[in-house]
Amino acid sequence: MPDTQEIKEVIKQLSSLTKEERKIILDLPDHFRRIVLHLGTLSVLQALVRKSIQQFRWENRDKIAQLLERLQKEVDPEKGIITGFVYSYTSFAPLQQLEKQKLEEEEKITFHFYDILATLLEKFPHHPKTAAKLKKIEERLIQAKRKEKVVIALSVHLDSLLAAFRQTIGLWQRKLQEERALLNTIREQLVGPFISTQLPLLRECSNKLQEHLRYGRQLQVRLHEEFYKPFRTFLEEKFTVEDRLNTILEARRHWYSPWRKLQVTRQDFVLDYYTLTSPEDVLEYILALEALGTEYIAPDLQRFLRRNKKRLLERVRTQKATLVQKLIALGKDPLTGIYTRGTIEQRLTELIELGKRNGLPFSLLLLDIDFFKSINDTYGHLAGDAVLRRITNAFQEVLRKYDLLGRYGGEEFIILLPHTGKEQAVAVAEKVRENVMRRNQEPVNPITKGPLTVSIGVATFPQDGSAPRQLIESADKALYQAKGRGRNQVMAA
């Protein structure tokens, strides 16, 4: 859990970002789209140059000249970005002004918040308002830290993220400068007739373009995976799936005639598809599209989804199966990412052996989600899976980094608390129970009509058992008592 000084350091780091860096960071989701478009145009140019070399004559000289002019306008080597000019040849042109407005709004929402905190810390460090805001940011940072599984100090982690960001943007700057020089060389060769003495230089340019395309895609993945994906957990996430679709529709509502149909096109889908990074993202995007209804989906995208949906979903299943296999190999539950029953029982055996040697106690919590069957029956099994993941997150927010969490059965969980006596274990269990209620106000429990809750049984080694089965049975009896007394309670053996 981050301490106050660590939180203050994080606030200082975020508020010290330059205006240009803030704009680039907030603009990254759309920047990834622009890279897709730019590299696509660059690959067309490379194909035409390669074909010209093969045929010993310029293949569509006018087209090459147009592409050269367009590509040079799209790059800003000084900032290391692809500019909004990339949209000029697409139906995304109306997004430019809207995106500019959204960036200004988001800067106030996100970084402006840290600027205010930095000022409060400097001028009013002991004011109650400062303490309240620190508490608010502490909750978010704890959640972000757990989500990213960060084990080092947040300030150190943030330093490494920002270093990765600045390094990658620096690489983009150099690569875009090289690209501009390369485009200028091709432009110079385009003047006059095609002659054999140009071949060595053109081959070199073609090879460099191919390398530039490959490296550009690698940099895009690197910027997303090494910086944006982990960093966005510390700020409000800019683009959810619904945000992507709403942005497209709102842009058209704002810029086109009111009677024009607001529809997501195949091009919209393809551009967004290439910025999605996990099987769940792709599946969520397809489901969100279907939820819009056919009136909001352009005919070309409807045809595309009819023909390719099965193949896309099969790819999602394959990717997810690979991920599941990796989790299983690590002894992790594929749904929640925590330990499986077999792994947690193995850890329990190891703790007992350690306890017998060093004489130190430890405790076991057995937890059960109250009325979970009614949740599945009322909302469906997909909603039930989502509840399991959310409740797992609620557990993790409270636990220490050395506590062990596993899924014991359908809706049953085990938590092992090393070096923890019964009194302290009951206190931890109460924190867990309260956090589950606080974090799970929706969907409501169909039986109680209130937030989702858990019942917890506590057992401690060695007083409640000196063997794995004895401890689990003791905790199970305590859990049964908690349920018998009305659920949403903690009982100790």
Image (cartoon, rainbow, N blue to C red):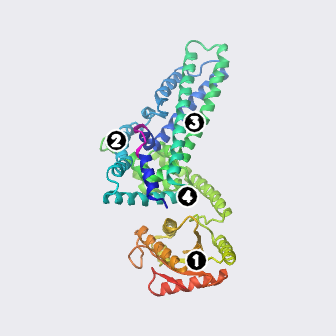
* First in residue order: circle 1 vs circle 3: 3
* First in residue order: circle 2 vs circle 4: 2
* First in residue order: circle 4 vs circle 1: 4
* First in residue order: circle 3 vs circle 4: 4
Residue 316 is situated, as x and y percent measured from the top left of the image, at 58, 55
Q: Which residues are magenta?
A: 15-20
Q: Place residue 202 in its image quadrant.
A: top right
Total labels drawn: 4
Residue type for callout 1: Leu
* Residue position for label 4: 149
Residue 376 in the figure: left or right of residue 197 = left
Q: Secondary structure at mark 2?
A: helix
Residue type for callout 2: Gln
Q: Is residue 287 magenta?
A: no
* Residue position for label 1: 364
* Residue position for label 3: 216
* Residue position for label 2: 101
Q: Residue at x 58, y 63 (%)?
A: 337
Query: Of tags 3 and 4, which is closer to the observer?
Result: 4
Marks 1 and 2, how far apart in space?
A: 53 Å
